[in-house]
Image (cartoon, grey):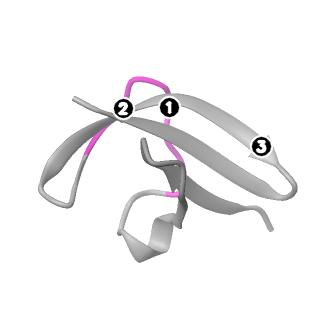
């Protein structure tokens, strides 16, 4: 099973379940995390990991 991670600007991968974000997202989706808004800008699949790149908005 593929695990889902989110990548913030600092580059560290954070498992979706640790920060209560969904395991499925689309480019352009906006989420609130740590009291800030982030937008999904890309999706990658690497070595059994689904990684969503986020940017602060």
Numbered disc in front, either 3 or 2:
3
Q: Position of residue 17 (x, y in %)?
A: 47, 73
Which quadrant, please, contains the N terminus?
Answer: bottom right
| 31 displayed left or right of 7 | left
Q: Which residue is mark 2?
A: 29
Q: Residue at x 44, y 57 (%)?
A: 22
Disc 1 to disc 3, C-alpha distance? 14 Å
The magenta stretch is 23-31
Q: Which residue is mark 1?
A: 26
As helix, strand or loop, the secondary structure at mark 1 comes to loop
Asked whether disc 1 touches disc 2, contact meaning CB atoms under 8 Å apart, the reply is yes
Badge 3 density bin: few <14, some 14–19, many ≥20, Cα 10 Å: few
Majority secondary structure in the magenta region: loop
Task: Using the image, determine if residue 47 lies above or below residue 45.
Answer: below
Corner quadrant of residue 28: top left
| 3 displayed left or right of 31 | right
Q: Earlier in the sequence, mark 3 or mark 2?
A: 2
Which quadrant, please, contains the C terminus?
Answer: top left
Q: Residue furthest right?
A: 47
Numbered disc in front, either 1 or 3:
3
């Amino acid at each position: 099973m593929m695990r889902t991670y989110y990548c913030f600007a600092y580059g560290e991968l954070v498992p979706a379940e640790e920060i209560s974000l969904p395991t499925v997202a689309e480019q352009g989706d906006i989420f609130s995390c740590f009291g800030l808004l982030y937008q999904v800008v890309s999706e990658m699949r690497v070595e059994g990991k689904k990684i969503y790149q986020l940017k602060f908005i």
